[in-house]
Image (cartoon, rainbow, N blue to C red):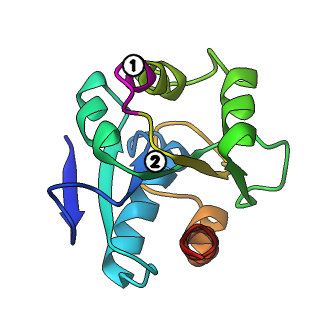
């Protein structure tokens, strides 16, 4: 299910999209992070927060309306669990191509962005805030390292958006 918390609905300035399956422990970090950000609501410009779940083509609409897109998701970084890395613009696309086919999502993010580009609806700026998971298995919540990483995810997302706004 897609749930939104928005301050700027009709034409999105910035879409912060959290993706992941909350039934698979740390795989749900994007959804948990978007909820955390929406509760703390301290981002530097009008932002729409969207729980994108495990992705589907229904997200093409909101994605096509966004001027800027930040995706928060679990990412294999080869790092300590809870490590946060930001991939912007071309680096974002390179990361998606490098990890193609290793997603548990219904539709890959790369596929979704390809659909957006076909309709000239690709956001001007793109970023992935990736978080190294500890475990991706049946679990009803995040591991301790990822729970502790939520403030850092929020900090790096805010910093990213502040740079884009400058």
- Taking the image as drawn, is residue 140 in sight? no
**Residue 106 x/y as whole percent:** 39, 21
Answer with the quarter of the image where residue 159 lies: bottom right
Whether pointer 2 and pointer 1 mark residues with C-beta atoms closer than 8 Å, the reply is: no
Split into 4 quadrants, where in the image is the N terminus?
Answer: top left
User: Residue 158, labelled with which disc?
Assistant: none
Q: Quadrant of the C terminus?
A: bottom right
Give residue 51's position: percent from left, percent from top.
Answer: 31, 50
Q: Which residues are magenta?
A: 115-121
2 vs 1, front mark: 1
According to the image, label 2 marks what residue? 28
Q: Left or right of 150: which side holds 22? A: left
Residue 109 percent across, percent down from the top left: 49, 29
Element under disc 1:
helix
Residue 46: x and y, percent?
33, 73
Residue located 28% across and 56% down the image? 12
| Residue 115: assigned label | 1
Q: Is residue 124 above or below residue 161?
A: above
Q: Residue at x 21, y 65 (%)?
A: 5
| Circle 2: element type | helix
Earlier residue among tags 2 and 1: 2
User: Between residues 88 and 123, which one lies in front from this camera angle?
Assistant: 123
């Amino acid at each position: 299910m897609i749930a939104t918390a928005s301050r700027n609905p009709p034409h999105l300035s910035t879409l912060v999209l959290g993706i992941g399956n909350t039934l698979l422990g740390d795989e749900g970090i994007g959804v948990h992070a978007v909820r955390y950000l929406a509760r703390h609501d301290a981002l530097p410009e009008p932002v729409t927060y969207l729980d994108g779940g495990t992705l589907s083509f229904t997200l093409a609409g909101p994605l096509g309306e966004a001027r800027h897109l930040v995706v928060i998701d679990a990412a294999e970084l080869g790092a300590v669990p809870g490590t946060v890395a930001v991939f912007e613009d071309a680096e974002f696309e390179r990361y998606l191509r490098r990890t193609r086919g290793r997603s548990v999502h219904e539709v890959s993010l790369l596929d979704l962005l390809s659909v957006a580009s076909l309709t000239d609806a690709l956001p001007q700026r793109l970023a992935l805030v990736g978080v190294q998971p500890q475990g991706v298995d049946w679990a009803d919540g995040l591991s301790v390292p990822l729970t502790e990483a939520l403030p850092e995810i929020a900090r790096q997302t805010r910093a990213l958006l502040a740079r884009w706004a400058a």
